Every structure is written in structure tokens, then in C-alpha cells.
Image (cartoon, helix red, strand yellow):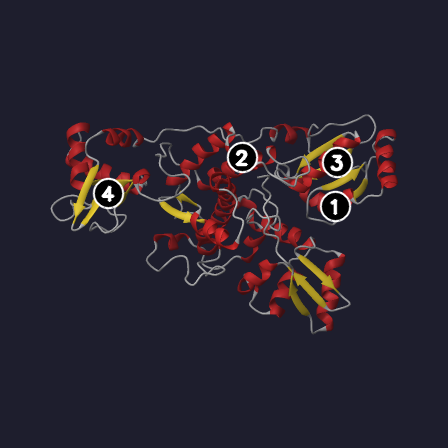
């Protein structure tokens, strides 16, 4: 099934995104019908999103057209009566494409977007990477005692400066400056409790006994740790987009034909996943403190969604409440010299350092350096962009800082279109919402009235929105919450 295959007669046009299980299932069904299909990835062709929304009134994917007849999404396709489906197939096979058929990307745009992200990137080796490699082979790194504590794989500032002078022929001032650069560029970190504040390089009479470790030797469980990021740091937005596109491509390749299951076992031994892991190492030294609000949103949403899948591949999918708690508090990446778990990213950074579900404390204390990265306020729209790996979560996508607010609103609108996000029962004056709204009610205003007004404001124009407006205007609206589907999509 080519992306823009056409026919002298008609065609089926499918607007989809990469990694969308419903899109995979719809295209598999269409493939069995033997009709010519044009698959348009609106993730790669965002210029078509507004037009598709205008034609369909929906923000979700897939959206399917037989010639110029809009069928709807995957559920609509699967529910078609056999005789109606056969009529549509005959229409495509026997009649010419009408002038008002849904649009395809411009030819030059299709060519520009033809290359999928495969994780290939140009690594410009950082000037300090060779110094670090030589330091690892030297006898400087070893066990050091401070008081009653022993610190393995450590070295003092004085030892580092002495080695740089002797082995690298540096003057003392240059050696001290190199030590500061190694610390600033996150090649090494000060050892907690060894007498020196983080972020300051110490050597000499008063501070030379401060101990350091190379970042790859610092003990933690981050999935991208244990190896030095030797490339010149990429920009955060560029790196997160590369990682997200790559993991989406990998995810798509291992989805079952019906779009319902993922073969994580096969994915974990894929050469593409190996390249993904190599690229994830570059997160270690990415610059975070200079990011704008929009850059932080796009970066951390993309990284969170990729990290969930990486965690599944390395540790397996959690199957009960305790395993889920451990998974989201344990699975982590080393980013900009600091460890961020899934909980840290969601509740610490994206929710403005608020307590998460079942958390007694805020993720970051007042002295935690990661607090500098947190958004000043919670952004409620992130709940429809984060993919937790369960079937009840929003679709996965890649986000860009240039258009992040519009993309987040589209994600919320798409989520509320589905009945597992919001259902309105006009007869009972009842609104049934996803458990997400219950767990994070504070982010949506804290009261039922404010919550329902938020939902109404973020709905697209649709019969559901009209029903909700009618129910709210009648007063005394009952709010209840739908069961949440925690089952995973793993084939194992």
C-alpha cells in the first residue's frame, strides 16, 4: 500500500498518523477489499489537518473516504453493513474520481516528507570526549574515602588537575578551566556528601578534596546511562523529535495487523531499537535551563512517550497496581545531567511540581536542581498528549515547539470526541468522563462546574457539544467517571 497510490478510476483516501493502532486496523481491512488506497500521514503533512477537519468535523484519525464519500473512522468502517461496504467498493472500482475528492499533499511536499526518521544523525564529536576517554584509561579514577564513607570510581579535583597538567601538558589555569568545563557540560558530577556544592568545580587547598565521578559511573537506574554521550549536544527539540519519530516508526513496524497488539519482544531485538538506545544516550548532556515554555512542553511530552515504550522493552509491561506504581516511579532517563522518572516528567515538570496520584509529596523539593526545569503552572492539556501505554490513553504523536499549543488543543479535542473520553446522557442529565478528569481534577479547576466548563470549551463543534451545552443549561448536571482500561497492548 503506497502512500499516494492512485488509480485511473477511484480511490480510498485514509488520513492517518504513524503509530495509530486504529489506523493500522482500518488499512488492513481496506487491504483485504482490494481497493486502491492513498494513505496520507497528517503527522508529516500538517498543512492538511484543517482541511480534513473541515471535511469531516472530526479531529481524530483515521478518517476514511471512498472517492468523495466520508465513511468516518475505523469503528465506522468496521460497522458498515456488508451491502453498503460492497456498494462503496464498487463505487471506487467502477467510477472515476470526482473533482471534489479529498485532497492529497502537493507533490513536492510529498517528496520532502518521504524520508522516515530512522535514527541516523550526524554526531559531531565533542572536544572534551577524548579527554574523558583518556581519563577512563588512566589510574586517576579509584576508591576514595571521606570520613566513614567510601566512594567508588571517584577522583578529587586536585587529582584531575594534576593529571591534566602531567598527561595533557596543560598549564594549571587551563587544567582548572577544563575541570570546570567537564562539570558544566555534564561529563562529570560532584559526589554527594563529599564537601562541595553541585555545579562548582573545586581544586586547591580548601576545595581540592571534593570528589567527582564521571556521569556514566554515577550509580542510578536510568535506561540511557552507563555510557558517555560523546557528541556535541543536539538542541533539545531536535533530539526529542528524532527519538519520538524513531520510536513511533519502531512501534508501527511491530503492531499486529489488527492494530490491537504490539510485539515488544521482537521490537527489543530490532537493530532500529539498538540505534534508538544509542541516540537516547545523547539526552545525558542536553541543555534544559534555556528552554522556553513551548520547548519544554514539546521536549518532555515526546520524551515521556518514548520512555514508556523503552521501559516496556527493558522491564516489561506492568500488570497490577503495585507494578504500575513502581514502573512510573522507577523507569527513567538521564537528561541534562539529572535523572527524570516518568512521574518526575509528568508531575514535576509538566504539572508545575504538583503531587501525582497516590503521592504524598511533591516530586521536587525546594533544593532539587530539577525544580528549575519545572513549568510555573500545571498545563492540563498535557493529559491528552501523554501516552501511558494502556489502551485507554490518548493516541501517540510527536509534538513541536513551534505549534505546541495548537497541537495540544487538537489532542484534547480528539480525546473528547471519543466515548471513552466523554459521554453525554441528555435524558439523565449526566456527563460521564474519563478517569483522567477525576485523578487530575485540580488541573481542570477543582470543581464539577469548572471541570464541565473546561470540557465544553475544549470540545470541537459536534452533536456531543450541543448535547453538553443543553445539559449544562438545564442545571444540576451529574458527573460520573468511566472505567479506565489499564490492560496493555503487549502480545506477551
- Residue beneath label 1, please? 75
User: Whole-Å distance between the Cαs marked 2 and 3?
Assistant: 25 Å
Q: Which residue is painted at 58% across and 48% down in the image? A: 390
User: Whole-Å distance between the Cαs marked 2 and 4?
Assistant: 38 Å
Kindly report which numbered mark, 1 or 2, lies closer to the viewer in this rendering.
Answer: 2
- Residue beneath label 2, please? 265
Say which label, 4 or 1, has the lower sequence index.
1
Q: Is residue 308 left or right of residue 475?
A: left
On residue 212, the disc is 4
- Closer to us: 467 or 154: 154
Q: Position of residue 104 (x, y in %)?
A: 72, 34
Say which label, 2 or 4, has the lower sequence index.
4
Q: Secondary structure at mark 4?
A: strand
Say which label, 4 or 3, has the lower sequence index.
3
Q: Secondary structure at mark 1?
A: helix
- Closer to us: 66 or 138: 138
Q: Is residue 359 left or right of residue 474?
A: left
Q: Secondary structure at mark 3?
A: helix
Q: Position of residue 158 (x, y in %)?
A: 16, 40
Amino acid at each position: 500500500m503506497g502512500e499516494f497510490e492512485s488509480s485511473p478510476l477511484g480511490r480510498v483516501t485514509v488520513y492517518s498518523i504513524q503509530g495509530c493502532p486504529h489506523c493500522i486496523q482500518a488499512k488492513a481491512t481496506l487491504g483485504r477489499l482490494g481497493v486502491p488506497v492513498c494513505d496520507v500521514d497528517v503527522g508529516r503533512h500538517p498543512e492538511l489537518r484543517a482541511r480534513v477537519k473541515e471535511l469531516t468535523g472530526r479531529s481524530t484519525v483515521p478518517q476514511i473516504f471512498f472517492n468523495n464519500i466520508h465513511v468516518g473512522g475505523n469503528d465506522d468502517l468496521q460497522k458498515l453493513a456488508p451491502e453498503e461496504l460492497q456498494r462503496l467498493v464498487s463505487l471506487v472500482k467502477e467510477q472515476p474520481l470526482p473533482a471534489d475528492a479529498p485532497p492529497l499533499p502537493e507533490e513536492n511536499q510529498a517528496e520532502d516528507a518521504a524520508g522516515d526518521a530512522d535514527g541516523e544523525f550526524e554526531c559531531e564529536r565533542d572536544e572534551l570526549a577524548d579527554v574523558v576517554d583518556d581519563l577512563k584509561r588512566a589510574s586517576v579514577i579509584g576508591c576514595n574515602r571521606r570520613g566513614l564513607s567510601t566512594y567508588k570510581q571517584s577522583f578529587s579535583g586536585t587529582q584531575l588537575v594534576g593529571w591534566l597538567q602531567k598527561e595533557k601538558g596543560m598549564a594549571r589555569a587551563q587544567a582548572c578551566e577544563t575541570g570546570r568545563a567537564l562539570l558544566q557540560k555534564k561529563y562529570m558530577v560532584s559526589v554527594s556528601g563529599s564537601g562541595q556544592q553541585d555545579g562548582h568545580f573545586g581544586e586547591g587547598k580548601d576545595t581540592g578534596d571534593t570528589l567527582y565521578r564521571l556521569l556514566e559511573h554515577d550509580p542510578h537506574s536510568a535506561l540511557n546511562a552507563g555510557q558517555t554521550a560523546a557528541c556535541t549536544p543536539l538542541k533539545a527539540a531536535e533530539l526529542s523529535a528524532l527519538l519520538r519519530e524513531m520510536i513511533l516508526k519502531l512501534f508501527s513496524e511491530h503492531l499486529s495487523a489488527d492494530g490491537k497488539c504490539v510485539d515488544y519482544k521482537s521490537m527489543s531485538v530490532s537493530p532500529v531499537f539498538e540505534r534508538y538506545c544509542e541516540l537516547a544516550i545523547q539526552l545525558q548532556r542536553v541543555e534544559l535551563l534555556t528552554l522556553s515554555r513551548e520547548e519544554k512542553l514539546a521536549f518532555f511530552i515526546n520524551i515521556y512517550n518514548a520512555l514508556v515504550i523503552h521501559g516496556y522493552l527493558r522491564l516489561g509491561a506492568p500488570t497490577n497496581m503495585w507494578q504500575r506504581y513502581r514502573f512510573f516511579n522507577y523507569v527513567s532517563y538521564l537528561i541534562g545531567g539529572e535523572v527524570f522518572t516518568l512521574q518526575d516528567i509528568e508531575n514535576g515538570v509538566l504539572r508545575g511540581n504538583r503531587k501525582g496520584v497516590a503521592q504524598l509529596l511533591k516530586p521536587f523539593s525546594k533544593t532539587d536542581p530539577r525544580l528549575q526545569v519545572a513549568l510555573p503552572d500545571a498545563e492540563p492539556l498535557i493529559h491528552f498528549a501523554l501516552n501511558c501505554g494502556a489502551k485507554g490513553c490518548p493516541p501517540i504523536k510527536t509534538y513541536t515547539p513551534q505549534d505546541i499549543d495548537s497541537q495540544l488543543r487538537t489532542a484534547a479535542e480528539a480525546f473528547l470526541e471519543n466515548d471513552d473520553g466523554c459521554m453525554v446522557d441528555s435524558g439523565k442529565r449526566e456527563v460521564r468522563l474519563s478517569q483522567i478528569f477525576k485523578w487530575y481534577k485540580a488541573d481542570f479547576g477543582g470543581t464539577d462546574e469548572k471541570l464541565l466548563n473546561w470540557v465544553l470549551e475544549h470540545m470541537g463543534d459536534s452533536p456531543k457539544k450541543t448535547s453538553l451545552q443543553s445539559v449544562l443549561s438545564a442545571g444540576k448536571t451529574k458527573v460520573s467517571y468511566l472505567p479506565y482500561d489499564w490492560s496493555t497492548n503487549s502480545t506477551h
